[in-house]
Image: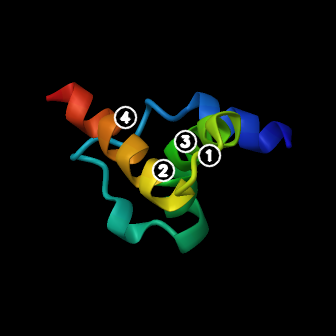
Amino acid sequence: MAEAKDAAAEAGKLPGPSSNVKTLPVRQYLDQTVTPILLKGMSELVNVRPEDPIEWLAAWLVNNNPRNKQR
């Protein structure tokens, strides 16, 4: 569980465009790119508990994409 919290804390720290994520093993790639922001979104999801959780999570991910905030 602590591992998930650590990953969520790293949500805003995705590898930059110069990082070569194509050479990472699958688990490491997901842990560095998708898992942190997804865990953060799912934590919010369980607090909100919307009627359509998939639609809500999709919108949350679009609105909270750390890559969009860097631009």
Name the side, left or right, on which 3 lies relative to 52.
right
> Which of pointers 3 and 2 lies earlier in the amino acid sequence?
3
Q: Which residue is mark 4?
A: 64
Q: Amino acid at mark 3?
A: Gly
Labels 2 & 1 near each other (Cβ < 8 A): yes
In this picture, residue 6 sits left or right of residue 29: right
Labelled pair 3, 2 in contact (Cβ < 8 Å): yes
Q: Residue furthest front?
A: 51
Q: Which is nearer the eye, 47 or 35?
A: 47
Tell me the amino acid under the disc marked 2: Leu
Task: Name the secondary structure under disc 1.
Answer: helix
- Which corner quadrant of the image does residue 20 belong to? bottom left
Q: Amino acid at mark 1?
A: Met
Q: Is residue 32 above or below residue 29?
A: above
Q: Which residue bears the numbered disc 3?
A: 41
- Spatial separation of the CA atoms under disc 3 and disc 4: 8 Å
**Residue 32 at x, y = what percent?**
51, 50
